[in-house]
Structures are given as C-alpha cells and as structure tokens.
Image (cartoon, rainbow, N blue to C red):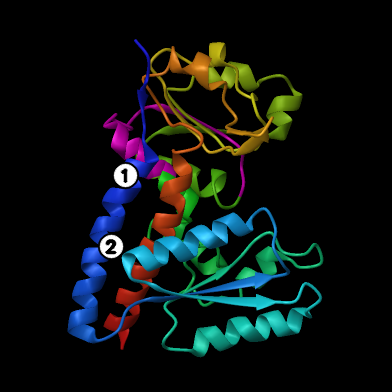
C-alpha cells in the first residue's frame, strides 16, 4: 500500500487560521499586533522567494512585516547597529536575519546580537542552550515543521529508532534534541557517515527518517525500512523541477508516511516563523 502523504500545506493552513484568530483577539484587546523585522543584506537572490513568502504569510495572519534592506557592501558594525536598534524598539516583536549573508559575515557571531526575547529563529546562543535544557521559548522553524509533520502522521515516537541525515544548526542538531525529548533513539548522520559508506546501513534501521542535506536522490528508495515515516527537508532544482533528497516514487512504496517536495516541510516553516513571532509578542506583553 502506498505511503500516506503528509500534506504540509494542509497543516499550515490550519495553523494560519488559528494564528489569525488569536491575533485579531489580541488586536482588539491590546490595540496592537506583533511586528516582525527582517534584515536582508544585499540584493535579490534565489532565497528572496523565502522573504516574499514571509511577507505574504505575515499579511495573511495579521502580523506587520518590516523588511530592512542593507547594501551588500555594508560594514559589520552597521549591521550590528541595526540589530541593536531593533532590540531596543518595543514595537518590534521578532527579528530575523535573512540568510545567506555575504561571505565575510559570520552568522553565528551575528546571531548572538539578536535579543533572545526577539529571536524568532531560535538561533541566539541563549536560545540554543535552552533547547538543550528543554526550556526553550521558540524552536528553529524548520525543525519545528518536521515535528509538526511527525505529529500529523499520528505515529507514536516513543522508543522509535530515528535517523537524521544532516547536522546543521537549524535542522539536524535542534531536531535531535526534540526527538530525544520524545524518547526516540536518535542517530545523526553527516558527510563522514557518507564517506565511510555507512549511510544506507543507518537508514535501513530508521523507523523515523528525516533528511536535510540538499542533494537530490541521496537516499535511495530501497534503503527505506518498511513502514518508516519519512520527512524530506531537502529542496533541489533538477531539470526545472523541485525535488527532495529522497527518491520519492520508490520510497512511496515502502514508507507508511512521507512528506512531498514541494508541499511538505516548506509551507510549514514560514507559518511556524509567524507562530514564533506571536509567541514572543505574548511573552513581551506579559513581561511589561
């Protein structure tokens, strides 16, 4: 029997409806709404599609979206100055520093200047530490989107063998912590796993498989364990078509649930960014 499709658009629409309803309620009672400030360094890039998606979803749910564009040649001190100014602006609920940044900038260093109270991506060092301690304010949106799809599957996570392919700071690492908190047995694979030729061996044991690498066809369909839940975070362009990291058609015949690309994790990521912004807004209101 073919796998059940984990429709990210469907879940994203459900979350949007809830966000819109709550923001209307807060606007009516408080006279204000969350505002998300996005800092973009440099001109249009292929990733500008994500910026446009942020603006669109923000407008749909009632969050004010403020895009601040800085020249690609701007000095680091000017970028930091903008971040600090937004930290001090009480009308700003959340701050996102759009990536990728020009090569001379260190994203990890710059993220430390974003107030932990306004860090919608959960990448400030303090927020990363709180994730490790299971006392976080918000979770990196893509990792959170994966957890939403796993919950949407209805499958029990406790005790499952979970394998994550990719160990980035915004997906693999935070996701490992979240799955550990759900009492999964977690294995994280990366480039050295691949070089040693052990990737297939780990994947064949995975009852929950999450792939976030950015390499089309990396995971072969025949490697998928029968009945596994497969979440494909990869986004790749092949012959004008967007595909994931997993051989989808073959995996479809072996998995119990699978997320499509596009239409799986992607639509949820932007919506969860807005949910994070709303959550930080409510925390800021309560602290005043």
The residue nearer to you, when weighing 122 against 246, is 246
Res 277 label? none
- Position of residue 149 measured from the top left corner of the image (x, y, whole percent): 37, 39
Q: Which residue is drawn at 32% across and 42% down?
A: 10
Q: Residue at x 46, y 31 (%)?
A: 260
Residue 165 magenta-drawn?
yes
Q: How crowded is mark 2: few (under 14 residues within 10 Å), some or many (20 or more)?
A: many
Residue position marked by numbered label 2 in the rendering = 19
- Position of residue 36 measured from the top left corner of the image (x, y, whole percent): 46, 74
Question: Is the residue 207 above or below the residue 19 in the image?
Answer: above
Res 11 label? 1
Magenta residues (range): 146-168
Question: Is the residue 278 above or below the residue 18 in the image?
Answer: below
- Position of residue 57 measured from the top left corner of the image (x, y, whole percent): 41, 61
The N terminus: image quadrant = top left
Residue 52 in view in this figure? yes
Question: Is the residue 29 above or below the residue 143 in the image?
Answer: below
Q: Quadrant of residue 137?
A: bottom left
Estimate the spatial distance between the alpha carbons at disc 1 and disc 2, rounded to whole Å.
12 Å
Q: Which residue is drawn at 74% across and 84% down?
A: 77
Left or right: where 211 falls relative to 93: right
């Amino acid at each position: 029997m073919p796998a059940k499709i984990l429709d990210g658009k469907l879940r994203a629409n459900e979350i949007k409806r809830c966000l819109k309803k709550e923001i209307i309620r807060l606007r009516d009672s408080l006279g204000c709404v969350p505002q998300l400030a996005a800092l973009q360094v440099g001109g249009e890039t292929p990733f500008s599609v994500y910026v446009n998606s942020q603006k669109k979803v923000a407008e749909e749910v009632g969050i004010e979206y403020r895009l601040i564009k800085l020249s690609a040649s701007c000095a680091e001190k000017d970028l930091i100055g903008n971040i600090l100014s937004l930290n001090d602006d009480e009308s700003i609920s959340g701050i996102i520093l759009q990536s990728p940044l020009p090569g001379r900038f260190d994203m990890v260093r710059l993220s430390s200047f974003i107030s932990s109270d306004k860090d919608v991506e959960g990448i400030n060092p303090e927020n990363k530490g709180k994730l490790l301690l299971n006392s976080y304010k918000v979770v990196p949106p893509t990792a959170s989107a994966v957890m939403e799809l796993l919950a949407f599957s209805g499958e029990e996570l406790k005790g499952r063998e979970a394998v994550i392919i990719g160990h980035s700071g915004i997906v693999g690492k935070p996701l490992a912590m979240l799955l550990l908190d759900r009492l999964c047995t977690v294995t994280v694979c990366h480039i050295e796993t691949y070089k040693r030729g052990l990737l297939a061996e780990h994947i064949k044991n995975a009852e929950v498989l999450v792939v976030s690498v950015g390499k089309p066809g990396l995971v072969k369909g025949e490697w998928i364990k029968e009945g596994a839940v497969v979440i494909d975070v990869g986004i790749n362009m092949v012959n004008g078509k967007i595909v994931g990291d997993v051989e989808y058609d073959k995996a479809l015949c072996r998995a119990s649930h699978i997320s499509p690309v596009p239409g799986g994790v992607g639509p949820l990521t932007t919506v969860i960014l807005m949910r994070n912004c709303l959550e930080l807004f409510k925390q800021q209101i309560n602290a005043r």
